[in-house]
Structure formats: C-alpha cells, structure tokens
Image (cartoon, coloured by chain):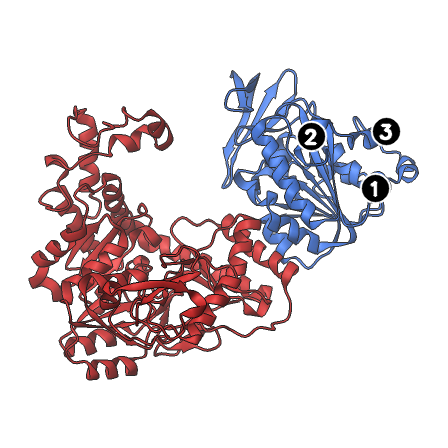
Amino acid sequence: MIREYKLNQEEAPLYDALLEYRKQRMVSFDVPGHKQGRGNPELTEFLGKYAMSVDVNSMKMLDNLIHPVGVIKEAQELAADAFGAYSAFFMTNGTTSAVQAMVLATVDPGEKIIMPRNVHRSAINALILSRAIPVYVDPGVNEKLGIPLGMSIGNIEKTIRENPEAKAILVNNPTYYGICPNLKAIVELAHQAGMKVLVDEAHGTHFYFERQGPISAMDAGADLAAISTHKTGGSLTQSSILLSGPGMADEQGYLRQIINLTLTTSSSYLLLSSLDITRKYLALQGEKIYQRVLEYANYARKEINNIGGFYAFGKTEIDHDAFYDFDQTKLSIHTRDIGLAGIEIYDILRDEYQIQIEFGDLSNVLAILSIGDRPVAIERLLGALSDIKRRYGKKADQIAVNEYNQPKVVMSPAKAFYTKSKQIPLEQTLGKVCTEFVMCYPPGIPILAPGEEITAEVLEYINYAKEKGSSMTGAEDLATEKLNVIDQP
Amino acid sequence: MTMWFTENHTKDVFFAFKAKQLFSTRSDFQQIDIYQTKDFGKVLVMDERIMLTEKDEKIYHEMIVHVPMAVHIDAEDVLIIGGGDGGALRELQRYPGIKSIDMVEIDSEVPEVAQRFLPEIAGDFQDARFTLMIADGLKYVRTTRKKYDLIIVDSTDPFGPGESLFTREFYGNCFDILRTDGLLVNQHESPYYRLDAREVQSTYEKTKMIFPIDKLFQAHIPTYPSGHWLFGFISKKYDPLEDLQDVRWSKLDIDTFYYNLALHRGSFALPNYVLELIGKK
C-alpha cells in the first residue's frame, strides 16, 4: 500500500445509499421531472434505465453536497483518507470550479498571487472572479522541445522575495506535458513566506497511487489541490475533487462557503456516485492499475523512439530544477523531426486513423494513458505513428517552435476584462491591450490573457497556429479574426 | 447434450442449427467453442460468431489462397495474419514454390484447438517451411524486418481481437513489408447487411488509399451472414485478371473443391449494389 488508510476503503457510503434508494421504490413528487426516466423514454433508451433511476435529487438519505452531513460527508472523508488529505470536497462543476475555489478562498480582491503563466484558462478566469493580481513567474523553457516547464526554484525564490505581500502561489503538478516542479521546495519556500500553496493537479490524480510517480500535492504539504478524478482516475466527466491540506484546517467552513458560491444546488448523483466508486477502486486497486499503465507507457515510449522521427521524451530530460520530475504515464511526443507540426499529426491521427489523442500543439502531441487503456489500442497508436512516418517522414527542416511567450502584462486580468473594449481586426491589434483570452484548445493555456499587450511575437504565434490548423478558442469572435482590445482614444 | 446454436446476423436476424457442444474455452482474447452438427460437420465458433464449418470452409480457404497464388505464382515468402485454424496454411502448403509461411496469430489457443478438434482442416503445423508466432498482428507488421510476397489477412470480424486488422495503420505497415510486386488478400466482410456493409466500405476506403490496385472478389459461403462474402485483392503491381497465370497454375494440378480459373475471373464481377457501395458504379 502506498499509504496506511485510517478508514475502511472497501466502503462506498454514497453508492450504498443509492442502491438502497432504488430498493425502496420511492415515489417521487420532487425534481428531476423525468422521475427515474419514465418521463423521457428516448433518453432512457439511450442512457439506460439504470443510470436514469439514480439521476435523483438531494434528499435525506442521499445527503446534499452543499450541506453534507450524511453519506456525502462520509464519502468525502473516505476520499480525504484515500488521498492523504486533511479534507476532500466533491465537485460537480469540473476541476475548473475547484481551481477557482482555491484562488477565491486564499486571495482577496486586489491581493497578489504568484503563478506561472502556463496555467489553464480556469486559473486566469479565477483571477477575473477574485480580482486578484497575478505575478507571473517565467516557467522556463526546454529549448530543444519548445515547451514550457515547471518554474525554477531560483525564479520562485526571487518572485517571493520581490512580492512578500502575495497571499498564495499556484503551481501545475504536472503541466499538460507531464512536467512536475520541485513541489516540496516550493511548499517550503512559500510557507516560510506565509503564503498558501495551491496546486492544479488536474492531470495528476494517479500521483496519489503510484509507487514511483512524482510527489503529490498532499504528500508535499500543499494547502489545496484540485484533482480531476475524471481525467486519469476514471470517474465521470465533470466530476472532480478539491483536496485540502492541514494548512487549511482553520478555514474549512470558509472554504465550503466559497465553493458554494458557484456550486450547483442540484449536483448530479451520477457524478457523485462515480466519485465514491472511483475513490474505492483507486484506494484498493490504484497501485496495481497505475503500475500497469506505467508499463504500457514505457513500452510505448520505447517503441515510438524506435520508429525514428518522433521523440517521446521521458525522465532523461529532467534538469533537477524547472524540469524537476516527469509523469511517465504521459506520452508527450515531439514531432518536428518528422517534418510535421504536432497539430497536423493530431488531425491526421483523428481523421485518417480514427485515433483521438489529447492534444497537438506546434511541436508536440500528447497521448494520455490511463486506467482504461489496453495493449491493442496502444499497438494501434504505434502502428499509426509508424505509418505516418512512412507516408510523411522527411528530414527535419523545421526547428522547434517555442510554445511559450513571456507575456507583457499591462493590467490585471479582472481590470482588463471589465474595461470598455472594442473589437478590431487581428492585424490591427499590435501594441494594443487585449481584454479576452486567445488559446488553442486543448491544451487551453492562454496565448493571450486579458490585460496583456498584443506583441508581434504573439501575433506571429496565432497566425502560425491557425495556419497549421489549431482550433483557436477564447475570443468573442469565434473565428479569432478579430480581438477585443481596450478602447483607447 | 443437443442444443440450438444461434448466431445473430443483425439485431433482428439470426441463423441457428441444432448442435452438440464438443468443447468450450475462454482464452485471454475470446470465447472459443466447437460444435458437432448434422448438416455442417464440426463448427468452430469464436465469440458467438461462426468462423468455419467442415462443410463450407474449403470455399473460404481456397478463395483466400488460390486467387492471389494464381496471380503471384512465384510468391516465396507468405505471411498469414490470424488464420490460427490452419485452413489457409493447408491450401498454401500445396504450392511447392513457397519457401516460408509465417503465421502471426494473437491467440495461442486457436491453433491448439484447431489441431485437436479439426485435424482434417488444419494444415501441417510441423512443416519445416512453417513458423507460428503468437503475437499481435499489427505489432508484427510494424516491427518485422522480413519482406513478404504475399500477406493473407485471415481475421475475425472488426470487433474483438481482430479490430486492429481493419485499420489504416495495419494496411500501411503491411505495405511497408511487401516486396515491390507484393500483394495482400484480406477477408472483407459481407456487403449485405447494413452494418457489415459499412465495414466493407470503410476497409475499402482505407486500403485503396495505400495500394495502387485494390479490387474486391466474392464467394458464396452459406454459413456466413447472408452467405455473400467479399475478399480484397490489394496489390502493388499485379492485377488479378490481367496478370492471372492460368497456364502455369493449371500445370500445378491442384485439386480443388470450389476454386477454378473461370471462377477466378468471374469472382471479380461484382453486383451493382456492391459497386455502388465502394463507389465504383
């Protein structure tokens, strides 16, 4: 076992309560109106009677997520125990809401928060909601691969020294590419300076159950962590958990209030039961499962590197600083040596091989391996990459394109977002201050965030990404041909 | 115990016969059953789909082997993907010119069951020219350094363990290991029922993008869904009709149950609805 559990992880109180509910054959005169599926035959045929019969409302025996005192409370306590946390909060608005709750709970309007700029849009959205002021740390870049890293300790130390009044520091563990920062050192530095450590662990659920994986936020002593159990853990899409460390012990009630600001009052029991059952499964089987996933990933990495032209990077890229550790279940593949942009390979895999991978950017693609993978599927990915090499493989004539541009922040995201703006054609935006997001989705890391100056570098990146077929999102203009900028006289 | 074996051909259509179960096992990959029947002799069933019957297996195996061999008559190195029942192997072994026959079968239990229960169907697994490899077919064609003259894709249906053998990546990697005059023959499902027809279409779409010559031929196999079955003749150089080596093939004096040279030519004449399905009408 990775950690000694204090509670009996064989139990699944919320799941049991739903089974019991079904046995009671309750007649419902409450919502949802489909009443165990009877009111919507086509939907019931599609999703199944079983699922519909537990799509129910909060009630005494099933507890209530916004005020948990019964089975949800017990299920959350089991989750906290399984993940080695002080407490756990089930989220039904996705990890986005967990990230927002972390920021809102620790940073008041006008206060500073330290973070790398290569965060998910949900973190910058949280800055708009909280009106917090970001202090961006250069995450560092691996020049060979063109990817942003996890921040060097030197940079963090300097930023903390220069911004002693900052309330919190937010880190990715891991980044989308699987890169992990030196979380333990960051926690130590931040706590010495009286700052909270918030960890976006959307892609790190499995860290809690891997024997040899990177350290998890809770093990490193972080104060809050947002884990997307649905991403690599196996629960239903949109279900997520916010973990709290002992550093938040005195603020549990406040944290609950903050979560409730945006939490739906009709949380789905499909999502909630998926969290309860997933927690049980991971607590009991997680170590074995992720050991298998790791073996698949290491096999795939080796085979991909044998094809030639592709570089599935791994622990050899570790630099003991900004690239401190690597999540080996991520198949991050550098593609430039084959003469194709990552996004092109991403499109070819989907359109011509019916293989959907997580994302492609300009120089890399990412295939996520997880709880549901099988050898035959991995062979298909390897076979497809090998065939792409046969069809397209040419000499590397293109150098890695930098995925990260250091932003020129003119004003806080919140201030820019709420300032009067006008929409102008992209080509006329040079030097203007953007009031909205621009990003390729996935990965959803903003190229531009509200309050940043539109530089020549940024425009070049946007044009290049569009030319290579990236799907650009974030801007009001869905085609991203116009941008909202501050309406200066 | 006599019982009814039923195979669903669609959600609403099924095919059934009275049968006595002789053997049943669950391998790592699939359910394998052997039945004794009155009309079809012994029947091999995998994941509840009939793979072969003693009565009509010759039709399938002769067509999947003699059609390509009568064209590429000098083929020396042959690869069978799947085909663990040994029927295609048996037909190939009738060609003295073949130097090596490699079989890549994912499920080790299939050749074992075939040799034990279907010895008359299974070819000679001890032949010095023959090598059996228990491996994933897609992985094998991706990684092998050996070159082949002929690849026979004798797979199960495109769901279950055979799924990766109906993919573009599989055919692309096959292209790579075929010699410049090499060719590939695959079992191409049935054009009749709507869902099967979709598979015909999608497999054809994939192979025709990779190989310059891609033609379908047909056979009548009574125990397969609809009885109307297709095969793909997918080739780098040889055309199945223009390059048919009829004189040389006749000299080999191979005694067949179903295949003959007139049938070879005729089997490439497709019904209009099939031509339409593959966009050739």
Quarter of the figure with residue A6: bottom left
Which quarter of the rendering shows the C terminus of chain A?
bottom left
Mark nearer the N terminus (2 vs 3):
3
**Label 1 is found on which chain of the structure?**
B
User: Could you tell me how far apart the alpha carbons at marks 2 and 3 are, in whole angstroms?
Assistant: 21 Å
- Label 1: which residue? B71
Report the disc number at residue A240.
none
- Label 2: which residue? B274
Quarter of the figure with residue A331: bottom left
Mark nearer the N terminus (1 vs 3):
1
Camera-nearest residue between B77 and A413: A413
Camera-nearest residue between A145 and B119: A145
Residue for point 55% across, 42% down? B163
SS state under label 3: helix
Tell me whether marks 1 and 2 sit on the same chain.
yes
Q: Position of residue B207 (x, y in %)?
A: 67, 45
**Label 2 is found on which chain of the structure?**
B
Q: As displayed, is residue B146 above or below residue A41?
A: below
- Label 3: which residue? B262
The chain coloured blue carries which letter?
A: B
Residues marked 2 and 3 touching at CB (< 8 Å): no
The chain coloured red carries which letter?
A: A
Question: Disc 3 marks which amino acid?
Answer: Ala
